[in-house]
Image (cartoon, grey):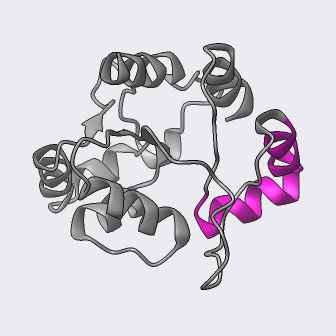
Amino acid sequence: MRAGLVEPALARGWQVAVTLTPTAGRWLRMSGEADRLETLTGLPVRDEARLPGEASPHPKVDCYVVAPASANTVAKLATGIADNQALTQVGEAIGTLELPVVMFPRVNAAHARHPAWKRHVATLREADVHLVYGPDVWPLYEPREAPAGRELPWAAVLETVERLLG
């Protein structure tokens, strides 16, 4: 995440704040990546809600990027489930006029074949979520054939944000 998305965003002069799902927070804290992200951005990496009365540690947001988005995250956002800090923020952003949300769903072919998947994608598009998605962006793969070493489409995500923000 750091080299592919955060560093290029910072190089474009953007201020970056990172909020993670609890699972991603655990992974990035165990690997030390959360500490590196905090050093790079100068802001705390959030994966827990703040308590009532606590000030937000992040500045006002111009655009949300949800990347990579798991099938679980896509399904929850499409159905309005906000059971963690990251989903709460993005769910609210989806309902906020003129606050862009860009999402890169990183799912395999089995997830995409699930009967609910097309409805989830359609619901997010209807809500004006800008999906960086499709075979030209990230080809679907079978679960047992994960694409080892394949570069995630961070440039396409950043270009989408840039286009939306002008």
At x 65%, y 83%, the residue is 51
Q: Quadrant of residue 55?
A: bottom right
In percent of width and height, residue 149 lies at 65, 25
In percent of width and height, residue 96 lies at 26, 54
Nearer to us in this view, 57 or 49? 57
In percent of width and height, residue 90 lies at 40, 57
Residue 21 part of the magenta segment: yes
In percent of width and height, residue 69 lies at 45, 48
Q: Which is the main secondary structure of the residues drawn in magenta? A: helix
**Would you say 54 lies left or right of 126 here?**
right
Query: In this picture, which residue range is highlighted in magenta?
Result: 20-39
Nearer to us in this view, 130 or 30? 130
Residue 32 part of the magenta segment: yes
Quarter occupied by the N terminus? top right
**Would you say 44 lies left or right of 39 here?**
left
**Would you say 84 lies left or right of 111 here?**
right
Q: Quadrant of residue 33?
A: top right
At x 32%, y 39%, the residue is 100
Nearer to us in this view, 132 or 166? 166
**Would you say 157 lies left or right of 128 here?**
right
At x 40%, y 25%, the residue is 161
At x 16%, y 43%, the residue is 125
